[in-house]
Image (tube, rainbow, N blue to C red):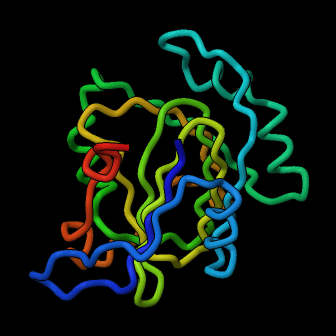
Amino acid sequence: MSLLAIYPHASSPGVAAPLPELITSDASLIAAELAPRGVRFQRWEASAQLPPGADQAQILAAYASDVARVQEHGAYPTVDAIRLEPSHPERASLRQKFLAEHTHGEDEVRFFVEGRGLFCLHIGDEVLQLVCEKNDWISVPAGTKHWFDMGPKPAFCALRFFDNPEGWVAAFTGDPIASRYPLLDELMDGR
């Protein structure tokens, strides 16, 4: 289930995150809440069944029509697929890297075709936590402070779209804000 939690303000260092002012799993409400903040959210059909161990070429071939839909207006000429499983040998180091607040010089566009992950957006005085899972498409504007949690046992696959041929390039802010908010497993406990 997709889930959005909106916290009223970013807390000060050493202070726990405030309680969220909104928590919803309604896709229409999620899109409506994110749109005024410049973030686009849509539900698409991730219909291809990927075989175990599918490589990037197989994943991109299976979702060629979705790639074409995103690229039809000339945006995002570079696309790749990231697929992480609980046994991935670099899961812990990748998780730590993505958990550090950062920005990108381009939009961050993702289409989740398996599993789930947690996008945390630091926009103005708010923190928005969005659990994206299979069938979720998200576009986060360039320059938006954010971090991502895939959990301690990642199990997701997402198509990643880029303006930049270099792919994923991050500028880390050095702000420890991510440590004050729930991680994916904490947010999903009891849901």
In the image, residue 1 above or below residue 19:
above
Q: Quadrant of residue 19 in the image?
A: bottom left
Q: Quadrant of residue 119 in the image?
A: bottom left
Horizontally, is 185 left or right of 77 in the view? Answer: left
Q: Nearer the viewer, residue 185 or 23?
A: 23
Residue at x 16% of width, y 76% of height: 16
Residue 25 in percent (x, y) is at 55, 53
Residue at x 22% of width, y 44% of height: 93
Q: Nearer the viewer, residue 21 or 111?
A: 21
Residue at x 90% of width, y 58% of height: 73
Q: Quadrant of residue 102 in the image?
A: bottom left
Q: How many marks?
A: 0
Residue 14 in percent (x, y) is at 9, 81
Q: Nearer the viewer, residue 110 or 90?
A: 110
Residue 147 in percent (x, y) is at 37, 63
Furthest residue toward right: 73
In the image, residue 132 above or below residue 8:
above
Horizontally, is 69 left or right of 9 in the view? Answer: right
Furthest residue toward left: 14
Horizontally, is 9 left or right of 28 in the view? Answer: left
Residue 40 in percent (x, y) is at 69, 65
Q: Quadrant of the C terminus?
A: top left
Residue at x 52% of width, y 59% of height: 24
